[in-house]
Amino acid sequence: MAEPEEEDRKPQSDEAHSAFTPVGGVDQAAPPEEDHPSSEFTIPSGLRIPQTNEDTESSAFTPPETYDSRQPPPHFTPPTGIPVVRLVKEAPWQDRMRTILRTPVAERPAPEPTQKHHEDDEGRAVPRVLDLTLRIGELLLAGGEGAEDVEAAMFAVTHSYGLDRCEPNVTFTLIAISYQPSLVDDPVTASRTVRRRGTDYTRLSAVYRLVDDISSEDVEISLEEAYRRLADLRRNRHPYPGWALTAAAGLLAGSASVLVGGDVLVFVAAALGAMLGDRLAWLCAGRGLPEFYQFVVAAMPPAAMGVAISLLDLPDVKASAVITGGLFALIPGRALVAGVQDGLTGYYITAAARLLEVGYLIVGIVCGVLMVLYLGVTLDAGLNPETSIHSSDRPLIQILASMTLSLAFAILLQQERSTVLLVTLNGGVAWIVFGALARTGGISPVAATAVAAGLVGLFGQLLSRYRFASALPYVTAAIGPLLPGSATYFGLLEIARNNLNPGLASLSKAAALALAIAIGVNLGGELSRLFLKAPRPEGQKARRAAKRTRGF
C-alpha cells in the first residue's frame, strides 16, 4: 500500500516545478483589492442584465428595455431647448421654404401637409410626388432660376404633400431628391437631368403660380391636377412670335447705341446689324450648332456694320456706338447674375458651372468681334475710341433709351405682358440712379453700377413677393442699361490695334462692372428681407446666415 502513496506524491506535470508554485502547508494572504485584474468590458456588480432570446433580431434603432417613451430621459435636450421655427403664414412661400432650407436638418420642423394625394396606399404616392417635384425643379432651373430658389420650390412641393424628410440637391445639369420614410426604412431617391435651357419667363411665372397654389391652404390641388397643369404650361406657346423677337433684338441694340452717344443713323445701323445677327444665330441653331458658334455668328454683323460706317467716313457718326449696341444685345447678363448669386448663397459647383458657361459665351463674342475688327484695322478703317463710357450729356434722351432697352430686353426674355411696364420703369430708375451717382456725384462707375443694380434687385424682390412670383422677370431686363458694352468694345478694339495693356485694362473694367451688377442684384435681394415678415426660430431676433465658415 506504500507504493500508491509514493506515486501520488510524485509531480504530475512540469507545472509542479514552477518557482511560483505555493509552498505546501503555508497559508497565502489574499491580494489587495486594487491588484485584482479588471477589464473595461467587465460587467459591474449589481447591474441587471436583461434576459433576451438569442433568436430575436436586434437593430441599432431598437430602444433599450430601460427606456420608457412616455417618460424619456431629458439628458439629450440642450439646456436652452430646441428652437421652434414659426412658419408665418402671411410670409411668401419662398421665404418660408428658404427658412427651412437654411435650418439644420435636426431642427427642421414638420409642417402640416396642405394637399392630399388621394391614394389608398401612401407608398404608391411617394414616387409620384418626387417625380412631380423633379419636373417642377427642371423647369425652374432650365428657365435660369438660382439653385437656392429651385430647392425652395422643391421643398414647397414635397412638404405640401406630406413628405417632410426630403433632401433636394441641385447642380447645373442634375436635379436629385431623396426621401427617407423613417429611420429604419430605405430612402427613395430620384434624379433628373437638365439638358436644354431656354429663356421663357412666361412659363417660369406659370410654374411659380403652380407652386404657390400647391403650397396654399386655400387651394386644393391633387397630384392628378398638378400633373395636368404642368403638362398644360409645357405645351403653351411663347407669348411673342419670332419676328417680334428679331425686332426686339434690333430695338435693344439701337437703344443701346443711343445710350452711348449715337444718333438716328447709328440707331438704324445698330438695329439692322443686330437683327441680321439674330437671324443668322437662329439659322445656326436650326442646324444644330452649339451655342458658342451661335454667339460668334451673332457678333459679326454689328461689328461689320460699324466697320462699314467707319470706311464711309461719315461726319459726326460714331461707329463705336454701332458695335457697342450690338454687344449689349449679346452679353449674357442673365447667366452672370445667376452664377454670382449661386456662389454667394453657397452653391459653388453650380456657380462655377454657370460662370464657366458665361466665359465660353463671352469668348464666342470676342472671337466674332475680333475677326471683323482685325479686318477693319487691315482696311485702315477709322476705328478710334472717340467716346468714353456713357459720356454723352443727354440725360432725357438717355433715360428714354434705357427704358426702351429694358422694354426690348423684356420681350426677348418672353415675359408676360403684365410685367413689361414694371420692368421698363425699373430699368429707367436704374439708369437715373447710375447717372446721378456717376455723372453728378462723381462716384466711380463701378460703385455707381453696384448701387443701381442693388436698387434693381431690391425692387425686383419686393415686386416678386407682392405677386408671389419669381424675381427674374423684374430684375434681368432692368439691368440691361447697366451692362458693360462700351468697356467690352473698347477693350477688344485696343487688342485688335495691338495695344494689349489698354485693352486688358478696359476688359478688366468690364469684368468689374459685370461683377458689380451681379453682386448688387444679390445684395438688393437680401436687403429686401428687411422689409418682409420672414419666419425665424422662436427667440431668435435675426435670420440665420446660410454659412459661417469663419475663413476655415
Image: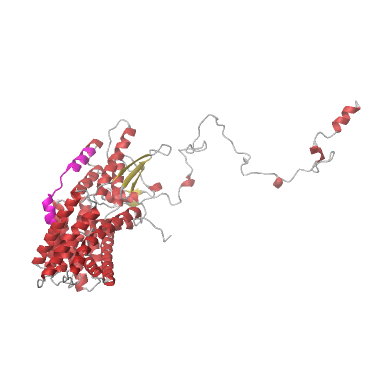
Residue 383 in sight here? yes
Does residue 337 sit above or below 388 in this rendering? above
Quadrant of the rendering where the N terminus is positioned: top right
Tell me where residue 31 sits by quadrant.
top right
Tell me where residue 449 sits by quadrant.
bottom left
Residue interval drawn in magenta: 226-248
Residue 421 lies left or right of residue 442; in this view the side is left
Q: Nearer the viewer, residue 357 or 160?
A: 357
Residue 161 in sight here? no
The extreme top residue here reads: 1
Tell me where residue 314 sits by quadrant.
bottom left
Residue at screen point 36% across, 50% down: 103
The extreme front residue here reads: 378
Tell me which secondary structure the magenta stretch mostly adopts.
Answer: helix
- Horizontal and vertical percent for residue 316? 10, 72
Does residue 6 sit above or below 151 in this rendering? above
Count of numbered circles on the image: 0
Q: Is residue 42 magenta?
A: no
Q: Does the magenta stretch include residue 232?
A: yes
Residue at screen point 80% across, 35% down: 13
- Horizontal and vertical percent for residue 213? 23, 43
Does residue 207 sit above or below 463 in this rendering? above
The extreme left residue here reads: 264
Quadrant of the rendering where the C terminus is positioned: bottom left
- Horizontal and vertical percent for residue 512? 28, 66
Q: Nearer the viewer, residue 515 or 37?
A: 515
Q: Nearer the viewer, residue 374 or 184?
A: 374
Residue 17 lies left or right of residue 57; in this view the side is right
- Horizontal and vertical percent for residue 67? 50, 38
